């Protein structure tokens, strides 16, 4: 039994006609909303299209399949397009446009609206079928995004892929080694060297990338510093030798619409910080926005707080070498 390639409900006009749909019936189906025209010669079942609007990943999968059909069933989704289909976190507003690669350049000068099309070769093991659409593997996707954007962007994807179990450290290393001599291949190598599924959010991944880039001693991620379980306290970043704990306050923690228990959440956070401080640590905090837009300010704040810990506990302070990542 052959495995179907494509999203159920997304079809070419040739497939619809093969099922007995006449030109008049096709026009009527589009007029009544039973079919939605996505691209020239590509249509989607109306119910499938409307249902896909509930989740950005589902909608992007449908749109990617339509682009793949319009390209003559050639190529594969790459970059942030592949990341979305795999359920990996991407920046707000991505991926626009759809990102596709294919082994040969299409004939003629025909443009594909909303598609960024590149010609590239790929190892057979770097592409697989996900939700009916050919995409690069999560490991390849993380490496590609690191080279196209930067180390932090690739680390976000790699950490999430390791955490969810859809990529392995070995796969990341293999892909990065193949790309080591490519443009910006050093970014993929950094991702493979530092990816860790222990980090639980994009904000933590971006923060850690900033530590690497600045040459800070690297902390342990998401470890217990005061007890365990309900009465304990776990921290985002811990520099045990320096008696310093780092906490990144992501938007999911504080900017959700106010709930009846919101005050309790904030009180719990204060109590958690108190337990950490009572265990003999200085706590330094920053926001996800700072980690993404002002990483140097975050590093400077961490170094300042480490000096406070040094005076309080007689430990060595942290030092930054301010090494550039790119």
Image (spheres, helix red, strand yellow):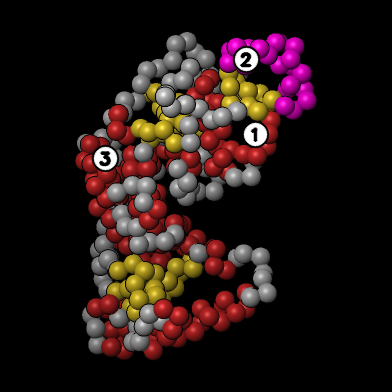
x 36%, y 69%: residue: 222
Vertical comparison of 207 with 267: above or below:
above
Within-10-Å neighbours for mark 3: few <14, some 14–19, many 20+: many
Q: Secondary structure at mark 3?
A: helix
Q: Main secondary structure of the magenta part?
A: helix
Check disc 2 and report the residue beneath it: 19
Viewer-proximal residue among 109 and 165 = 165
Label 2, label 1: how many angstroms apart (C-alpha)? 20 Å
From the viewer's perspective, tell me whether residue 233 is left or right of residue 40: left
Q: Quadrant of residue 215?
A: bottom left
Q: Earlier in the sequence, mark 2 or mark 3?
A: 2
> Does residue 269 appear to the left or right of 219 in the view shown?
right
Q: Position of residue 14 (x, y in %)?
A: 58, 12
> Where is 183 relative to 266, above or below?
above
Span shown in magenta: 14-34
Residue at the spot x=53%, y=25% of the render?
A: 67
Q: Is residue 249 magenta?
A: no
In this view, 32 is above or below 293: above
Which residue does the image show at 50% across and 27% down from the upper left? 6
Are the residues tagged 2 and 1 within 8 Å (C-beta)?
no
Q: Nearer the viewer, mark 2 or mark 1?
A: 2
Q: Are marks 3 and 1 in contact (CB under 8 Å)?
A: no
| Helix, strand or loop for disc 1 | helix
Magenta run includes residue 19: yes
Q: Which residue is mark 1?
A: 49
N-terminal of the pair, mark 2 or mark 1, is: 2
Tell me residue 266's x, y (percent).
Answer: 56, 78
* Picture coordinates of residue 71, whole percent (x, y): 49, 19
Mark 3 lies on residue: 175
């Amino acid at each position: 039994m052959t495995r179907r390639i494509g999203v159920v409900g997304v079809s070419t006009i040739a497939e619809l006609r093969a099922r007995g749909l006449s030109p008049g019936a096709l026009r009527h189906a589009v007029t009544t909303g039973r079919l939605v025209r996505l691209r020239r010669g590509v249509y989607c079942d109306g119910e499938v299209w409307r249902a896909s609007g509930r989740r950005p990943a589902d909608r992007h999968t449908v749109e990617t399949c339509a682009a793949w059909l319009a390209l003559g069933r050639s190529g594969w989704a790459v970059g942030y397009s592949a990341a979305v289909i795999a359920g990996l976190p991407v920046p707000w507003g991505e991926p626009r446009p759809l990102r596709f690669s294919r082994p040969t350049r299409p004939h003629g000068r025909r443009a594909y609206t909303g598609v960024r099309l590149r010609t590239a070769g790929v190892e057979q093991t770097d592409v697989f079928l996900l939700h009916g659409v050919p995409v690069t593997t999560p490991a390849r996707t993380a490496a590609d995004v690191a080279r196209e954007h930067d180390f932090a962007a690739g680390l976000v994807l790699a950490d999430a892929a390791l955490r969810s179990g859809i990529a392995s450290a070995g796969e990341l290393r293999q892909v990065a080694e193949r790309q080591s001599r490519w443009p910006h291949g050093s970014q993929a190598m950094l991702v493979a060297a530092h990816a860790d599924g222990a980090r639980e959010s994009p904000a933590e991944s971006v923060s850690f990338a900033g530590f690497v880039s600045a040459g800070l001693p690297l902390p342990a991620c998401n470890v217990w510093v005061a007890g365990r379980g309900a009465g304990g306290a776990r921290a985002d970043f811990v520099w045990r030798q320096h008696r310093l704990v780092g906490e990144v306050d992501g938007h999911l923690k504080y900017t959700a619409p106010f709930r009846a228990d919101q005050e309790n959440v904030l009180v719990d956070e204060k109590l958690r910080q108190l337990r950490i401080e009572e265990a003999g640590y200085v706590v330094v905090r920053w926001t996800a926005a700072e980690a993404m837009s002002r990483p140097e300010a975050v590093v400077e704040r961490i170094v300042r707080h480490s000096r406070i810990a040094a005076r309080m506990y007689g430990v060595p302070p942290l030092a930054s070498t301010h090494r550039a990542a790119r």
